[in-house]
Amino acid sequence: MARKELAATGAMKELMATYFRDLGEAAEKHTAPVAWCTSVGPAELLRALGFRVYFPENHGALLGATRRANAYLPRTHALGYSPDICSYLCSDIGAYLAGETPLDRFGLERVPRADVLVFNTNQCGEVRDWFEFYGREWDVPVVGLVSPRSVGEVSPRIVDDVAGQLEDLVPALEAVAGTALDAGRLERTVGLSRECTDLWREVLETAAHRPAPMSFFDGCIQMGPAVVLRGTGEACVYYRTLLAELEERNGAGVAAVEGERFRLYWDGMPIWGKLRDLSNLFARFHTSVVASTYCNSWIFEALDPADPFRSMARASVELFIARAEGPKECVIEAMAARYGVDGILFHDARTCPHNSNTRYGMPGRLRRRLGIPVLTIDGDLNDLRCYSEEQSRTSIEGFIEQLAEG
Amino acid sequence: MSGEKRERGAVFGGIDSGSWTTKAVLIDGERTVLGSAVVRSGADLAAAAEKAYAAALAAAGLAPESVAAAWATGFGRDNIPFAAGSRTELDCHARGVHHYVSGAVTVVDIGGQDAKVIKLDEAGRRVSHRMNRKCAAGTGSFIDEMALRLDVAIGELSALAAGFEEEVELGSFCTVFSGTELLAAIRRGKRPADLARAAYKSIVKRVMEMDVMEDRVVATGGVVAHHPMVVSLMEEALGKPVTVPPHPQEMGAFGAALAARGASPGKGS
């Protein structure tokens, strides 16, 4: 049994294809400067400077989703990068070393070469090491934000610090872009990002409806434009289309998972190479994964075109992954209530400790506090050697049996 | 019970298709075990299930027609063509244990290739479960590996360990690393009996860290059935008794038979 596919997906695929083709052309024909950027920004600043923006984490996810990651990991490990570090990083660099990319389906022979790489450490420090590999490889600048992690209260001092770092990036980026930052263009870009983020939130919130018109597995696919095209009008146009379809589903009571019986929250990274299998497994048991930490990570409610630098900084600091255990638990608690979930599934991703909220006792604390069952499964975002198909199937099936017992 | 003629509907079967062994159990309407069998799973799970089921029927002196329904569990639960239904081994071990032990319990099931800790509330409902990571440490495979390194038949390891004189520590993180540690200890002149006990302690350490062992602790699984030292070391580590219910290795199959009985409208005679 499979979940019901969304009709809008065709338009999304075309939008993504256009984005990648445009990027490839910019890199090959030098029609525009190319910047690599971490998925959580600062993309708005780069777009406002005229860069075509490429997100290597998206490439990592593509490698995982196409099940090509494991073929490339050994090349990077052999260079001295540990198998215990980010498998996005290792599969991406491995694919580069092999001279291959899943972007070949969009006509790109290689990943678009960067003129500058811009990192943000709010999610992890490994993105910096990842970007510095390419910086050395191509002898191009690597700049970024050292945004704090494990943030408790988002204080003005922290926001000011990151805002200052963002402003400090501007001269270096202007030098690469060959143009001065236009304040009006930045405001418009931040405004479009905010609009995209608001629409993406509305899209995800349609799943609060019973039955949910979309699931976490749809979200993992549909989030593409929110990651790589926020700050553009095209992303907003797409999400309006998607939102209309989802609202229509809700109006007609159409479920993503036929006969929805149980509703779950997914915390942690997707297991990209197992999205379809897991989606089918849950659907077989009439269980819909209606909400997730991951898909919500591209909602940046702080963005404000009237105060671009400080609002971008606040968005960076407020990000779920950058927060301490306490604020994270509050977010999950609120989500569990909002979406009416029957249980929470935590994915402990072996190579992504920062996005695995299982390592300091949180599942047990939330189980006791919320009074709903929780389950932890071991796996990884890309390295499928860390995932046991059989064990996970039994664990998930057993968990759903437990929910059925009441 | 052997040779007794029964009406169809009076008997329920359970098959636990495990990674190493396949277990079959037959029960009557009163949940009494009539017969059971354990065979190696091998590569043909359906054939192993047939063999175990036939052996259990023979042990009970029953014809296949006596059985109202047989349900399956274990990692091969979807590969048993004659099973009328299936439940996970998490469910079946919980059911089986709750039949024998009342009240809130922590079930520790140690099988050939996985270990589970299942918590049940007062009513026998599952509260949570944990399974071992993708690693053989803390499972029966670990014991096999250690027996191989000590050049001892697997069935003799527990008796060997009972003759220990000195406490030796082995790691519990990885089967391969623990094997290397064991070889180093042999080189240092450590006695096989002490190393056998150390291997068991390693398993227990690994299992104890999977979850908090609250309430009454009940141990099941093939490792528990065939390696009593694991239970005594668990008791030592916990400082409290560990209950081993009847037929611990067949507990999953017993639970599957209970599930079959539970799904039957008449629930037997």
Image (cartoon, coloured by chain):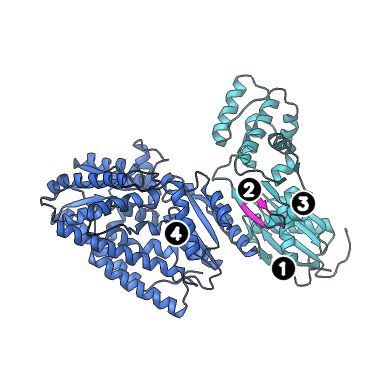
Chain colours: A blue, B cyan
Image coordinates of residue B62 in percent, x first then y, are 83, 62
In the rendered image, the quadrant that contains the C terminus of chain A is: bottom right
Question: Label 3 belongs to which residue?
Answer: B101
First along the sequence among labels 2 and 1:
2
Residue A277 in sight here: no
First along the sequence among labels 2 and 3:
3
Residue B116 got which mark? 2
Check disc 2: other Cα within 10 Å, few if <14, some if 14-19, many if 20+. Answer: many
Residue at 55% of width from left, 36% of height from top? B174
Q: In the picture, residue B176 is in which quadrant?
A: top right
Residue type (three-letter) at the residue carrying disc 4: Ser
Question: Label 1 belongs to which residue?
Answer: B263
Q: Are marks 3 and 1 on the same chain?
A: yes
How many badges with numbers are in the image? 4
First along the sequence among labels 3 and 1:
3
Image coordinates of residue B135 in percent, x first then y, are 55, 42
* Closest to the observer, B203 or A347: A347
Check disc 3: other Cα within 10 Å, few if <14, some if 14-19, many if 20+. Answer: some
Question: Label 4 belongs to which residue?
Answer: A292
Left or right for A77, reference A139: right
> How far is disc 3 from disc 1 in space, using C-alphas?
22 Å
Seen as rendered, the residue at the extreme front is A156
| Foreground tag (3 vs 1) | 3
Q: Judging from the image, what secondary structure is the residue with disc 4 in?
A: strand
